[in-house]
């Protein structure tokens, strides 16, 4: 079960962690918390796998861009090139290049 807590002096609740099973069993309750400004981190066997945040709130990246601390990429990321065919082990190829 997720625990929602409010830090003293905070205007919105602090993030909470919820397991996949609890999220599935209590989805409506967790969505209601997210609508109310709560951030919910979904965990699978204790490891964070997803984050539910209120829709429409600026992300941390959006905030940093607005503050001028981050510059967005000018072009989209290019896909990686196709690997070159090679024979032998990588360590042998490196040894050849070092000679």
Image (cartoon, rainbow, N blue to C red):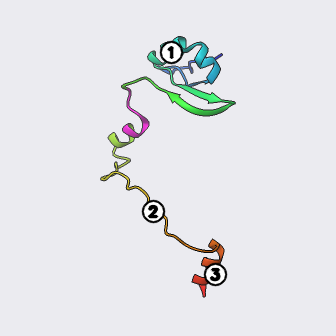
| Between discs 2 and 3, the one toward the N terminus | 2
Return the residue at label 3.
95
Marks 3 and 1, Cα distance to the nearest angstrom?
58 Å
Q: Position of residue 46 (x, y in %)?
A: 68, 31
Q: Relative to 75, is 82 above or below?
A: below
Q: Under tag 2, what secondary structure?
A: loop
Q: Which mark is residue 82?
A: 2
The answer, for residue 4, to whether it is visible in the render is: no
* Residue under the point 43% across and 37% down: 60
Q: Residue at x 59, y 19 (%)?
A: 23
- The local secondary structure at tag 1 comes to helix
Give the vertical position of 43 relative to 88 (above or below).
Answer: above
- The residue identified by callout 1 is 33
Residue shown at 43% from the left, 62% from the top: 81
Sequence-earlier tag: 2 or 1? 1
The mark lying in front, picked from 2 and 3, is: 2
Relative to 22, is 68 on the left or the right? Answer: left
Q: Secondary structure at mark 3?
A: helix
Q: CA distance from mark 2 to mark 3?
A: 23 Å
- Count how many numbered circles sit on residues in the image: 3
In this view, the residue in front, 5 or 62, is 62
Looking at this rendering, what residue extends furthest in the left direction?
74
Badge 3 or badge 1: first in the primary sequence: 1
In this rendering, does residue 16 appear at all?
A: yes
Task: Give the magenta range.
Answer: 57-62
> Residue 37: x and y, percent?
46, 19
Whether 73 is drawn above or below 63: the answer is below
Check residue 31 for magenta coloring: no
Quarter where residue 57 is shown:
top left
The picture places residue 73, in percent across and down from the top left corner, at: 34, 51
């Amino acid at each position: 079960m997720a625990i929602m807590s409010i830090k003293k002096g905070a205007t919105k609740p602090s993030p909470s962690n919820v397991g996949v099973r609890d999220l599935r069993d209590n989805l409506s309750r967790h969505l209601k918390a997210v609508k109310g400004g709560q951030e919910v981190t979904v965990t699978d066997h204790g490891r964070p796998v997803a984050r539910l945040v209120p829709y429409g709130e600026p992300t941390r990246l959006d905030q940093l861009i607005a503050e001028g601390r981050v510059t967005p990429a000018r072009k989209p990321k290019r896909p990686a090139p196709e690997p070159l065919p090679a024979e032998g082990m990588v360590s042998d190829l490196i040894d050849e290049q070092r000679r």
